[in-house]
Amino acid sequence: MDNCQKKTLELIFRDPVAVKVPWKDIESLLRALGCEISEGNGSRVRLALGGVRAVFHRPHPNPETDKGAVKSMRKFLTNAGHQP
């Protein structure tokens, strides 16, 4: 994991919840952690990491995630055994 990916992980777990985390940075982090990413219908993205599965929606038209998605990503990563 490079420094940018470490910063993204810390940003996801920051309190108060971060807003406007770029989705491309989250995907880069997930790939570095070994997450399997597959495309779903429309903007859906299926994730599998450490035996945990989830479906997220790529944000659009803006490339940043909202608070709710960041909270969900935090829970997904925690359940998969990844925290800063």
Image (cartoon, rainbow, N blue to C red):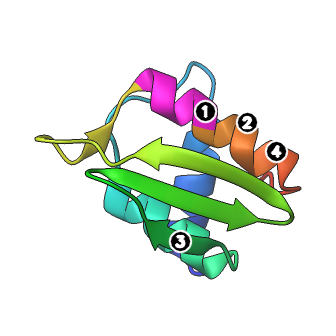
What's the residue type where badge 4 is placed? Thr
What's the residue type where badge 2 is placed? Lys
Q: Name the residue under label 2.
A: 75
N-term mark: 2 or 3: 3
Q: Mark 1 points at which residue?
A: 72
Q: Name the residue under label 3.
A: 37
Residue at image point 53% right, 59% down: 46
Q: Is residue 13 left or right of residue 66?
A: right
In front: mark 3 or mark 1?
A: 3
Is residue 70 magenta-colored?
yes
Q: Which residue is situated farthest in the front direction here?
A: 41
In front: mark 2 or mark 3?
A: 3
Residue 51 vertical position relative to residue 16 in the rendered view, above or below: below
Categorize mark 1 by other alpha carbons within 10 Å: few (<14), some (14-19), many (20+).
some
Residue 37: x percent and y percent?
A: 53, 71
Q: Name the residue under label 4.
A: 78
Is residue 8 magenta-colored?
no
N-term mark: 1 or 4: 1
Q: Which residue is situated farthest in the left direction here?
A: 61
Toward which corner of the image does residue 75 lie, by quadrant? top right
Residue at image point 14% right, 41% down: 62
Residue 68 vertical position relative to residue 9 in the rendered view, above or below: above
Q: Looking at the figure, which quarter contains the N terminus?
A: bottom right
Residue 81 vertical position relative to residue 1 in the rendered view, above or below: above
Residue 63: x percent and y percent?
A: 21, 48
Tell me the element at label 3. strand
CA–CA distance in space, label 1 to label 2: 5 Å
N-term mark: 3 or 1: 3
Q: Give the range drawn in magenta.
A: 67-72
Residues tagged 1 and 2 counted as in contact (Cβ below 8 A): yes
Tell me the element at label 2. helix
Residues tagged 3 and 4 counted as in contact (Cβ below 8 A): no
